[in-house]
Image (cartoon, rainbow, N blue to C red):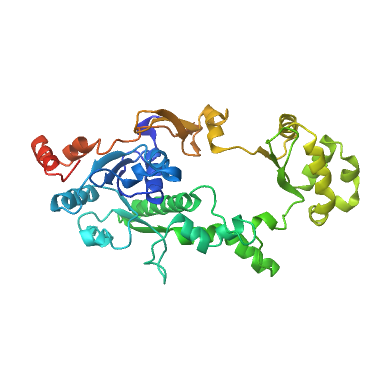
């Protein structure tokens, strides 16, 4: 999609973030066309140097941004940060509560200099008794019930991705877009806050509602009473190749039984309605498991796709690099800091039938300092002097 045609083209964003939640807000806004300046400490965001499960954080959530490194412990660094914010439409930060306020960069400090600024703070908690606690994605998954629901009884298990960081960032974007729409009417900006804990509660809200409706606390997903009789992972005749299959309506049940020659089950009036089948899982599932265990996964996939039932081969993240559907437009070509070319997922949406692409590759540490500072009116000599003094990079 042409950069000038992107929906948020022309909006200026300054980002004081690290890790995942804050950067996820910035990458979504950047993918949608905003001009994002990521302010990093001298030497670069520590997220760039994480190992293990954190090694992918920076590459995934920092494309379509420019990088400027500032020493925010210096007067010059704070002055530049304020200039960026004064010219911005949106400011994003996810540091501990009060960190930017100590630097004179609190939301209310821009009331006169930039009354249209939308100031988004991504925190662990919204207002309340916990708001000054330090939180992480995993912390709120544990205290918000998601880890309990994910793991087997007695073994709380975090989800296999930074789901709360990312979902919390998405709510931040929703709040920013709502504030932008309000600004169109009033001319005034505002303060948006999004959080990890309340995001977790929202995601498990369906289970809270389940308890309210049924009067029984929900059990963890591995031992839950499913809403459908066939909604599970099955072994196949192909070694180490499992398959998830869901049959979630009465018409799908009929289709399933006809396609797999389970006529007796399909014709039995005792299994005609969904809730009847749920109560008869102990009868139905062993027959289905035996059926699938005797068939190759490729054969099952072909048949399930042909008859239109929900199914999914159990895949690993590394296998998605070769997924033909994602390679039809869902992956973006980016360059890792060491020069390695790879492909990573773009925004999971289309606008007018088009996907959102790459406008700027993953930035090097402070790679855009010269251009960003020149746009603020600094001369080459002034930039060189600040760089020599270690105030910028």
Viewer-nearest residue: 49 or 303? 49
Task: Quadrant for residue 192, please give it.
Answer: bottom left
* Residue 195 percent across, percent down from the top left: 43, 59
Q: Is residue 92 visible?
A: yes
Residue at x 46% of width, y 49% of height: 166
Q: Is residue 337 left or right of residue 300?
A: left
Taking the spot 41% from the left edge, 48% from the top edge, the residue there is: 20
Who's the residue at 12% across and 43% down the image?
386
Residue at 48%, 49% in the rendered image: 162
Above or below: residue 277 compared with residue 359? below
Where residue 54 appears, as percent x and y from the top left, is: 42, 45
On the image, the x and y values in percent for residue 218 come to 66, 63
Above or below, 128 relative to 137:
below
User: In this image, 253 relative to 135: left or right?
Assistant: right
Observer-nearest of 366 and 86: 366
Picture coordinates of residue 17, whole percent (x, y): 33, 50
Is residue 104 among what the camera can see? Answer: no
């Amino acid at each position: 999609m042409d950069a000038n045609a992107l929906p948020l083209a022309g909006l200026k964003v300054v980002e004081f973030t690290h890790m995942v939640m804050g950067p996820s807000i910035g990458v979504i806004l950047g993918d949608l066309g905003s001009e994002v300046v990521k302010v990093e400490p001298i030497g670069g965001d520590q997220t760039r140097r994480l190992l293990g499960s954190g090694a992918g954080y920076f590459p995934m959530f920092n494309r379509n941004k420019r990088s400027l490194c500032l020493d925010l412990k210096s007067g010059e660094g704070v002055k530049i940060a304020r200039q960026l914010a004064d010219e911005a439409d949106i400011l994003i930060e996810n540091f501990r509560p009060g960190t930017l306020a100590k630097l004179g960069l609190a939301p209310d400090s821009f009331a006169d200099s930039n009354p249209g600024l939308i100031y988004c703070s991504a925190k662990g908690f919204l207002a309340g008794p916990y708001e000054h606690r330090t939180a992480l994605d995993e912390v709120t998954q544990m205290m918000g019930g998601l880890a309990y629901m994910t793991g087997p009884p007695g073994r709380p298990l975090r989800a296999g991705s930074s789901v709360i960081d990312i979902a919390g960032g998405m709510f931040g974007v929703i709040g920013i877009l709502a504030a932008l729409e309000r600004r169109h009417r009033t001319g005034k900006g505002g303060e948006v806050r999004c959080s990890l804990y309340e995001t977790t509660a929202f995601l498990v809200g369906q289970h809270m509602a389940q308890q309210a409706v049924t009067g029984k606390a929900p059990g963890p997903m591995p031992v839950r009473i499913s809403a459908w009789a066939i909604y599970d992972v099955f072994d196949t005749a192909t070694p180490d190749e499992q398959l998830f299959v869901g049959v979630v309506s009465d018409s799908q049940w009929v289709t399933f039984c006809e396609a797999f020659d389970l006529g007796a089950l399909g014709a039995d009036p005792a299994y005609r309605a969904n809730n009847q089948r749920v109560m008869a899982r102990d009868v139905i599932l062993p027959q289905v498991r035996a059926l699938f265990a005797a068939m190759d996964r490729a054969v099952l996939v072909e048949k399930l796709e042909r008859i239109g039932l929900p199914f999914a081969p159990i895949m690993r993240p590394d296998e998605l690099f070769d997924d033909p559907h994602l390679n039809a437009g869902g992956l973006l070509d980016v360059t890792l800091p060491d020069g390695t070319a790879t492909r990573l997922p773009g925004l999971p949406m289309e606008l007018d039938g088009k996907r959102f692409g790459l406008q700027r590759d993953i930035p090097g540490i402070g790679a855009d300092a010269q251009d960003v500072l020149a746009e603020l009116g600094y001369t080459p000599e002034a930039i060189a002097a600040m760089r020599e003094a270690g105030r910028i990079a």
